[in-house]
Image: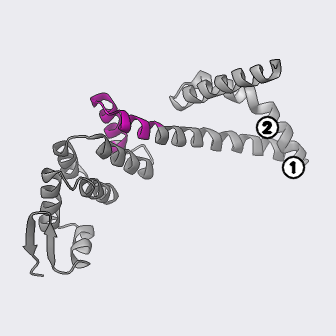
Amino acid sequence: MELAAYESRSSVNDIQLITRVAAGDAAAERELYETYVDRIYRLTFRLAGDDELARDFTQATFIRAFEKIDQDLKEKVMCSLSQQRGVGNEQWLMNIAVNPKEEIELRKKALFWAGQSGVATSELSGLYTRMTDEEMKDALIFTFSQRQSDRAAMDKLFDIAKNEKTPSCAKRRSSGSGSHVIRGHSSSSST
């Protein structure tokens, strides 16, 4: 029984430690490293049979682990925050979406979850206007398309389809039939 209680406490402590690592706590990163480095080294040494190779594998393991902790935890937190709603949560999601230091896929997911959480369409429209990255613009178009009952979102989609001169918008327009109907709007392309 004592072993089970220890393992349970250890698991909770590890989760707290990993959460702190994901939040950027350098001391937690060092603590996590020191807690597991010997175990990982012993395992990799048993597998590789060479000290230098085992050290390289151990280092690579921690590098990948820290990168993975950051990405996975952020994705889970983004989903959770979007469901809880709230201005602070929405702002955090939008901050990730516009941060060029974040991976593009994470930025697109943050934008998706921000859209799901109810960020104002006017804020998303303003972001679209300021956005220069085509992948992010496409993610915004998708976000607008998920708001079919939102007249402002549909108006923005119509405006983009009608007026955007970027190559990706031209490609989207040319792949259509020439006549576009967006919930209550209609226009005929004359290309």
- Residue 141 image-quadrant placement: bottom left
* Residue corresponding to mark 2: 40
Q: Position of residue 44 (x, y in %)?
A: 83, 44
- Which numbered disc covers residue 172? none
For the residue pair 79 and 70, the one nearer the viewer reads as 79
The residue sitting at 9% across, 65% down in the picture is: 185
Q: Position of residue 179 (x, y in %)?
A: 14, 78
Q: CA separation, marks 1 and 2?
A: 12 Å
- Which numbered disc covers residue 48? 1
Q: Position of residue 162 (x, y in %)?
A: 12, 67
Q: Element under label 2? A: helix
Q: Residue furthest top?
A: 2
Indicate which label's residue lies in the foreground, 1 or 2: 2
For the residue pair 130 and 160, the one nearer the viewer reads as 160
Q: Residues within 10 Å of mark 2 (few under 14, many from 20)?
A: some
Residue type beneath disc 1: Ala
Residue type beneath disc 2: Ile
Q: Identify the magenta region.
A: 77-98
Task: Specify whether 65 is left or right of 176.
Answer: right
Q: Position of residue 55 (x, y in %)?
A: 80, 41
Task: Specify whether 126 is left or right of 31.
Answer: left
Screen quadrant of the C terminus: bottom left
Q: Is residue 50 above or below residue 82?
A: below
Q: Is residue 20 above or below residue 121?
A: above
Query: What is the magenta segment's predominant secondary structure?
Result: helix
Q: Is residue 19 magenta?
A: no
